[in-house]
Image: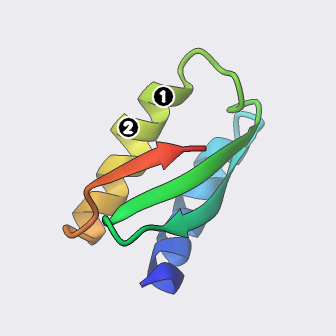
Amino acid sequence: MEEKIIGAIDKIRPFLQRDGGDIEFVEYTKDNVVRVRLQGACQGCPGAQMTLKMVVEQILRSEFPEIKSVESV
């Protein structure tokens, strides 16, 4: 499952990199939560949580309905 999630994150990554940011997969928990680390311009950006929930989480949950949420660590 982790490899599939990483593959999906790799598809999202170019959109974040275009604005100077990036995203790193950290873990997939037993509770079906994906933990990621925002990097670059995304780290500390006021819109980072919105991007995380409205873009990253929505895309991952549409591909993998068993994912409950995506959290930044």
Residue at image x 55%, y 73%? 6
The answer to which of 29 and 62 lies nearer the viewer is 29
- Is label 1 in contact with label 2 (beta carbons under 8 Å)? yes
Q: Nearer the viewer, residue 40 or 16?
A: 40
Please tell me whether residue 30 is drawn above or below residue 37 in the rendered image: below
Label 1 element class: helix
* Circle 2 Cα neighbour tier, 10 Å, few/some/many (<14 / 14–19 / ≥20): some
Compare residues 29 and 9 and report the one nearer the observer: 29
Q: Secondary structure at mark 2?
A: helix
Point out the residue furthest to the front here: 30
Amino acid at pointer 2: Lys
Q: Which residue is mark 1?
A: 49
Q: Which of 55 and 49 lies nearest the eye of the viewer?
A: 49
Where does the image place residue 59, in percent across and percent down from the top left?
34, 56
Q: Is the residue 7 above or below the residue 14 in the image?
A: below
Residue 9 place in picture, x, y as percent: 54, 64
In the picture, the disc for residue 39 is none
Query: At 62% from the left edge and 56% from the top edge, which residue is drawn?
Result: 13
Residue 71 in percent (x, y) is at 46, 45
40 with respect to 56 (left or right) = right
Q: Which residue is mark 2?
A: 53
Image quadrant occupied by the C terminus: top right
Res 63 → quadrant: bottom left
**Residue at figure coordinates x 32%, y 66% from the top left:** 32
- Report the amino acid beneath label 1: Gln
Residue that extends furthest to the left in the rendered view of this protein? 65
Classify mark 1: residues with Cα within 10 Å, few (<14), some (14-19) or many (20+): some
> What is the C-alpha distance between the residues marked 1 and 2?
6 Å
Where in the figure is residue 54, as x and y percent of width and height? 35, 36
For this view, does 3 lie left or right of residue 70?
A: right
